[in-house]
Amino acid sequence: MIILLLLGGPFVLMANKQVSFVASSPQEVKLGDQFEIVYQINAKADNFIPPNFKGLTVLSGPNTSSSSGIQIINGSMSQSYSLTYAFVVMANRVGQISCDPAHVTVDGKKYASNSLRIKVIKGNSARASASNVVKQGGNNAGIAASGNSATNKDVFVKASVNNKNPFLGQQLVLTYRIYTRLPVSNLAINKVSSIKGFWSKDLLADNATLQQHNETINGHQYVVATIRKQALIPQQTGKLTIDPMELVCNVQVRLQAKRRSSNDPFGDFFNDPFFNQNVRNIKKTLVSNSVNIRVKNLPAKGKPDSFAGAVGDFSFNASVDKKDLSTNDALTYTISVSGSGNIQLIDSPSVTFPSDFETYDPKIVSNISNTNQGVTGTKKFEYLAIPRNPGDFTIKPVYFSFFNPRDRKYHTFHSDSINIHVSKGEGDSGIVYSGNGQEDIHFLGKDIRHIKEGPYHFRKANDFFFGSYLYIGLALLPIILLLLILILWRILKNRRANVSLLKNRKANKVSRQRLMKAQKMKKQANDKGFYDEIALALWGYIADKFNMQSSDLSMDTVKEKLLQKQVSEETIKGFMDTLNNVEFARFAPGDVRGKMENIYTEAMRAIMQAEKSLK
């Protein structure tokens, strides 16, 4: 009974919780605005029936999402659940718009949401303007950027495909790129594009870093990074639309400050973002453009009978592992298809084995690679066949056809006929399997199966699993695991509570990691990246060691903190000299490589000496 209460407790809480079904939307919108209408319920529901959105154009939806969680606070367990149906709509007339309640079913009982009243006024849609800016590549975006904000001229996202008029089943690549003139961080996809009518594959799933380059647009230089790339294979013909993708990010904007004299030789140095604290991060939502694709049907002329939907550029090979064998021995017939295209959607080719062979469904082995050009690789089909009668047999040719979009022609490969010699094996059972379906089993020369001989395994009567020691142990196992999880959770919570102590302990480790990254930058001849990482290692070490914010760091505060910890004058002087050398090294002429090596050695020595003194 205790076990049932522990394991079933959260579900009992959910069952007793009152069902809440709420609809929400903006109370006032402008004509042509795109906005969301959201229906949220706190229970698992089905049979969702939306209202008739009169006066609104539904652009997307219902987009369904759910979330659930379990909380344990002071030994009390609670569970929450939320199911959301979201619609993206656009107002198409001025006036008051009423939306009737939506309906769902929860545990056989129907529930209705509240109704909505939305006021639509005249005006230009800000969202539509942003969309137009993205379509034009940010060239005519909004208001000119000020020193305290970021406009769509400064940062925007653009979606593009390498082919807007493909054939049915032809692979194309969809790419999302971010264009920015400002530092961007914490980039996160808020809403992925709806790609109905396509089979898709993420091509950047295994990439740890973004591919980026510089590009000049209308005289402005942008840093361009590929943030998402997908291989798409259309599954239907006609006009298909890829909806916009929405993402959020933090954009670093420098506040307007008093300009330094143009004759100041260190103006650029002190205006470096790392040392200039007159900056702030603003959260910005970016929306890409939509992409329209018109999919053509495959030509009917010249389509072979063996064509089964393969589109791309492929090669074909068929082989058998043995041609001479005995009855009841197995042979493997392997068919290999390699190339680029919709290879993952290719079905197993049809192989006709002699009726005296017992056959099985093929084993499929895929070796697929995701490249910038799309999906490519090899797909193998291994057919297992067992001859049951001796004799000479022939495996007929196997045909494989595909359509190549490059030359717009069908191509057909076929294997050779394979002759198999089967000799009579020892202990032949005399069983004949007729047909590939393994039906119509016959016994030749025998009408009674041989009686099975020992050994036999007996079990003691009235020996049941219920009530045994194993049963009791398994029943108590959830309680023991729950107690262990609670104990471990409290230990981890207490450790993580002391943030300053954690940062202090990890300061040396973090600085070493940054020094290692700087070493890699040096090997890549990335001078700016090298000095930035060295500076981050030194300043970050002090910030973590003394639990300080980056905005509070300066030469004076560093020296003051080290003196408070009674660090020797020699160590302090070495650390301060290293900081100064790092900042001036990037602007000083001379042997760049030798200078970088000396800076790296000095930084490592300064951190090691400081760590010894601060322990």
Image: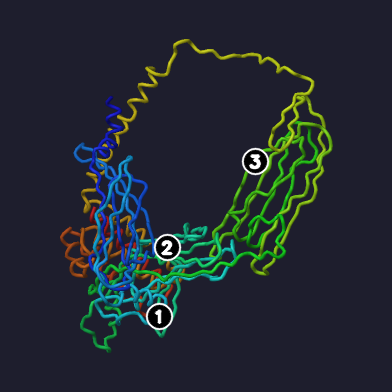
82 on left or right of 351: left
- Answer yes or no: do the residues labelled 2 and 1 have beta carbons within 8 Å? no
Amino acid carrying label 3: it is: Asp
Residue 267, image x, y percentages: 28, 82
Q: At which x and y percent is residue 306?
A: 71, 54
**In the rendered image, which residue does mark 2 sit on?**
193
Who's the residue at 57% across and 63% down the image?
A: 171
CB atoms at circles 1 and 3 under 8 Å apart?
A: no
Identified by mark 1, the residue type is: Gln
Above or below for 467 versus 197: above
Going by the numbered disc 2, the residue's amino acid type is Ser
Query: Please, what secondary structure does the residue beneath circle 1 have?
Result: strand
The image quarter in which residue 108 lies: top left
The residue where tag 3 is placed is 361
User: Mark 2 or 1 closer to N-term?
Assistant: 2
**Residue 155: percent from left, percent from top:** 35, 74
Q: Nearer the viewer, residue 33 or 393?
A: 33
Q: Secondary structure at mark 2?
A: loop
Crowd around label 2: few <14 · some 14–19 · many ≥20 (10 Å):
some
Q: Give the Cα separation between the discs numbered 1 and 3.
A: 57 Å
Disc 2 and disc 3: Cα gap in Å? 37 Å
Depth check: 283 or 556 in front?
Answer: 283
Q: Residue furthest top?
A: 461
Quarter where residue 538 is shown: bottom left
Label 1 crowd (10 A; few <14 / some 14-19 / many >=20): few
Residue 17 relative to residue 414: left or right: left
